[in-house]
Each structure stands twice: as C-alpha cells, then as structure tokens.
Amino acid sequence: MKNLDVYPIPVLARDLPDDGVAVAIDALRATTTITTALANGADCVTPFETVEETLQAKATIARERPELAARITLGGERGGLPIDGFDLGNSPRSYDRAAIENKILYFTTTNGTKAILTCRGRVLLACYLNADAVARRILTSDAERVSIVCAGTGGAFTEEDLLLAGLLTDRLTLADRNFALNVQAEVAREMWRREAETPLVEKLRASRGGQNLKRIGLSRDISDAARLDALDVVPECRRVSDFPNVEIRLGSARESQ
Ligand code: MLT
C-alpha cells in the first residue's frame, strides 16, 4: 500500500519525509495566484515567509545580479491587501500575461508561502484550477507517500483548503485503490463527497477564506479561484544552489514518468 495523508495545517506536517511527494494548498489565494502567474508565462516564483526577507532578497539581487533586477516583480499580501511598495497583490487576475510574462516573482503571503516552505520532498502546488493536472502528476509518479499540506489561516484549518484536499483524495483513490488514508484524508474526502451537488463557487464563498475576501471587497477572486480544472499546469518547487535557494517553476510531465 501507498500512503496518502492530509495535514489540515502546516504545523502538523513539520516532519515530512524527503522521498515523498508533498502537495501544498492555499486555494484562497496563494497557490491559485502562483499557478496563474506561471501559466501566464512567469519565469519562476520564489516564496518568502516575510516581507522583510522578500525586500532583502530583491536588494541582494540588485547588488549581485543587476542584469536580473528589472525582471523581479514583488507580489503578495498582508491582511489580504497589497503590500506597500510591492508591484502586485494576491489577486490571481492581476497576474495576466502583460503583467507577469518572463518575470521572476518574489512572493510572500500570510499563510500560503509559509505552507509551501514547510513541505519537503518533491513539492507540487495545487489549487482548484489545476486539480486534475496535479492528480494526474501524482498518479504518474512512483511516490510511496503523498502528503497534502493545507495552509489554513493563522494556525486554524479552513474549509476551502480541506475541500480541495478532499477532492484530490477522492480523485486519487478512485484512480488507484492502493492508497492507505490517514483519518484527516478520510474526513476531507467525505466533506468533498457530501457537498458534491453544491456549486464550488458557493462552497468557497461560504468558507472562512471566502468570507475574508468578501469582507475586503475581493469577491471576484473567489469565482476566479473556483474555475475547476481550467489550467493544465503543475507548479513544482525546487531547491537550487543559487540565491535565494527555492524556486517554483512549471514541472514537465515527462520528468515524473
Ligand atoms: C494566505 O497566504 O494567507 C492567503 O493567500 C491570503 C489571501 O487570500 O490573501
């Protein structure tokens, strides 16, 4: 049997093995925004935990690799809103081709980028837009252990992330009966199946992240994030020897076969 474990918040996933596949989820909105940026031609994305680290990394690149400085775009949010001095916020639709093609995105969000940096092993990023592509990528990998890590909000789990974990678990277990699930994976799959008839956008609007976005006037980001299976791309995290050490690019299906 292979293992499929869901972790509702990142702190529970601190000891992931180096030889498994980890899937980071922050459906509203970090992984949706990163996936959109890469699908629209961003060269790569580097996730940071803090605003300070992000600004320092840009200053270091400007000093050491001045030829790259013009291609760096700063993006992310605090309190859901764009960060002072940054180029872009955390709304997927602001990462269109005109804004992001060929750019190197330095990105920090409140919970999502921390969750991504918690993951170990081969790290993929999932959102509703690329759920099918991520499930297919996992099924064609030879991983014995798949860990789905939800970002949550401020250390509490959120429905929008757990539902996506449940959707992935549902699709993976329908395609391959050799997965043993942890309890959280079973609960997430049940959540997804129980609400199968409700339109996804309604479920996201009712979720904690959806309510937060409504409160700050960003409801349209919820419908953008609810475009199930709209993108056939899988962002993948790599540790690189070059500064700043972690980058997210579109992985190619061939590499996983
Ligand atoms: C996060 O990282 O907490 C989210 O992406 C927040 C947001 O939707 O802006």
Image (tube, rainbow, N blue to C red):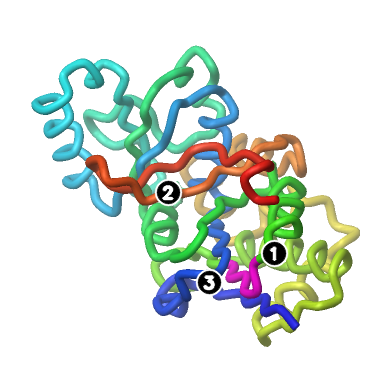
Question: Which region of the structure is painted magenta?
Answer: 143-148
Residue 126 visible, this angle: yes
Q: Residues within 10 Å of mark 2 (few under 14, many from 20)?
A: some
- Quarter of the image with the N terminus is bottom right
Q: Main secondary structure of the magenta part?
A: strand
Eye-nearest disc, 2 or 1:
2
Of the numbered discs 2 and 1, the one sitting upstream in the chain is: 1
- The residues bearing labels 3 and 1 have C-alpha atoms spaced at a distance of 11 Å
Of the numbered discs 3 and 2, the one sitting upstream in the chain is: 3
- Which residue is labeled 2 in the image? 238
The picture places residue 250, in percent across and down from the top left corner, at: 55, 37
Q: Nearer the viewer, residue 248 or 156?
A: 248
Q: Nearer the viewer, residue 21 or 152?
A: 21
Q: Residues within 10 Å of mark 1 (few under 14, many from 20)?
A: many
Eye-nearest disc, 3 or 2:
2
Q: Nearer the viewer, residue 121 or 150?
A: 121
Q: Residues within 10 Å of mark 3 (few under 14, many from 20)?
A: some
Residue type indicated by callout 2: Arg
The picture places residue 156, in percent across and down from the top left corner, at: 47, 73
- Which residue is labeled 1 in the image? 163
In the picture provided, is 91 more to the left or to the right than 205? left
Magenta stretch: includes residue 147: yes
The picture places residue 38, in percent across and down from the top left corner, at: 53, 31
